[in-house]
């Protein structure tokens, strides 16, 4: 059994030196546990925080700890009455060929409803984050303008589509022309801005969001957020979901930046954590699942094949290599 561990804490931008692939025995499930052959594993921006020795909402890993995250796979040995060998499940596991999962903490997966990688994206934690972050925190009304940063990623691509289903004008920021075309041609965004090709984000928003911004769903922070803050309408809502532009910073940028821009619009800025919505996950999963089944909600996953390539897939999140949800393909059926 191969398993990735945290080899050292990165400073600034991580590289592959932070990870080490170890060979060991296949783990043994105990009472109430499942041995799962991992088919796909998820790499997520929040994992950068867990590599840091600092208190945060996700507990920091110690050097030598196995890398962990959402996985989807097939039960090969069950020590629980709830699942049988051959069932497919998703839950929190190791970046490994085989992982032991607590049967009480996994969810069943039906490969006939959607391909397995979708359960790590639109039908997994990122999809639910989009759902609650937009609808509960952003609280959009029909006709309002919603701007989303990191728009072509796992969370952002779902946010924009749910906003469209709610009758909003939707504008996305993304880092390539291919992403911009996907957003506008396939997902129905009204406009998208390739922020790597545009110098003046505010001017770009003048065109893309001529009526100003009522809801800003922020996945990235930095200069994109600075520009959106200058376009907020009266009573605007800002949902702070992520700040990936800052995850590799060793010191926090200081100064008021664009906070004065919040005063006149009386804007509300609210952080969100998906774990707070656990009691309503089922509701979100049902709605997301029915939108996917009806074709109202498109999804895409970028698959990097091979457990040995998991660190590269993770690092690619910071250079925007993924369109939609980034996953790693670990094993074939
Ligand atoms: P994504 O699939 O969106 O992947 C990250 C994307 O961020 C990249 O594809 C890249 O796209 C973009 N990006 C990277 N660096 C920068 C930068 N410096 N400036 C602008 N864009 C950048 O990841 P997720 O959908 O999984 O997560 C999106 C955000 O939501 C993250 O910040 C994450 O931490 C947060 N999150 C928060 C949760 C919560 O409970 N609060 C739960 C889940 C996610 P591009 O090509 O456009 O640059």
Image: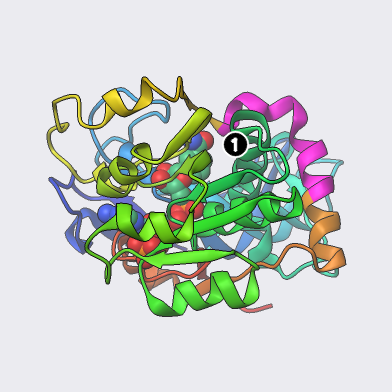
Residue drawn where x is 58% and y is 55% of the image = 170
Mark yes or no: residue 43 visible: no
Q: Position of residue 261 (x, y in %)?
A: 32, 28
- Seen at 75% across and 54% down, the residue is 165
Cβ of mark 1 under 8 Å from ligand 1: the answer is: yes
> Can you say whether 203 is above or below 39 in the image?
above
Residue at 51% over, 78% down: 181
Q: Is residue 253 left or right of residue 188?
A: left
Image coordinates for residue 220, horizontal then vertical, percent:
36, 47
Q: Is residue 92 above or below residue 62?
A: below
In this rendering, would 61 be left or right of 251? right
Instruction: Examine the structure image and report whether residue 275 is included in the region drawn in magenta.
Output: yes
Query: Which residue was labeled with disc 1?
Result: 133
Q: Is residue 248 magenta?
A: no
For mark 1, does the 10 Å Cα neighbourhood hold few (<14), some (14 to 19), or many (20 or more) residues?
many
Q: Which residues are magenta?
A: 274-287
Q: Quadrant of the C terminus?
A: bottom right
């Amino acid at each position: 059994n191969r398993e990735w561990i945290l080899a050292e804490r990165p400073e600034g931008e991580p590289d592959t030196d932070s990870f080490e692939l170890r060979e060991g025995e296949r783990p043994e499930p105990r009472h109430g546990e499942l041995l799962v052959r991992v088919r796909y594993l998820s790499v997520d921006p929040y994992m950068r925080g867990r590599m840091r020795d600092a208190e945060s909402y996700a507990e920091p890993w110690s050097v030598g700890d196995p890398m962990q995250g959402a996985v989807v796979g097939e039960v090969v040995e069950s020590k629980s009455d709830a699942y049988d060998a051959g069932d497919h499940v998703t839950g929190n596991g190791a970046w490994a060929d085989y992982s032991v999962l607590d049967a009480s903490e996994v969810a069943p997966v039906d490969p006939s409803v959607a391909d397995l990688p979708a359960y790590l994206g639109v039908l997994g934690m990122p999809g639910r984050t989009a759902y609650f972050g937009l609808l509960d925190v952003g609280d959009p009304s029909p006709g309002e303008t919603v701007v989303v940063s990191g728009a072509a990623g796992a969370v952002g691509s779902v946010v924009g589509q749910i906003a469209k289903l709610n009758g909003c004008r939707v504008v996305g920021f993304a880092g390539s022309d291919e992403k911009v075309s996907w957003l506008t041609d396939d997902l129905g965004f009204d406009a998208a801005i390739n922020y790597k090709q545009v110098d003046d984000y505010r001017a770009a928003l003048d065109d893309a969001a001529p009526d100003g911004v009522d809801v800003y769903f922020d996945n990235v922070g930095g200069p994109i957020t600075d520009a959106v803050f200058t376009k907020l309408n009266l009573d605007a809502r800002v949902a702070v979901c992520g700040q990936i532009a800052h995850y590799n910073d060793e010191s926090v940028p200081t100064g008021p930046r664009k906070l004065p821009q919040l005063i006149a619009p009386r804007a509300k800025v609210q952080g969100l954590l998906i774990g707070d919505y656990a009691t309503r996950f089922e509701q979100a999963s049902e709605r997301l699942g029915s939108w996917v089944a009806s074709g109202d909600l498109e999804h895409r996953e970028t698959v990097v094949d091979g457990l040995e390539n998991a660190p590269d897939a993770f690092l690619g999140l910071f250079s925007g290599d993924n369109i939609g949800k980034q996953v790693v393909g670990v094993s074939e059926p």
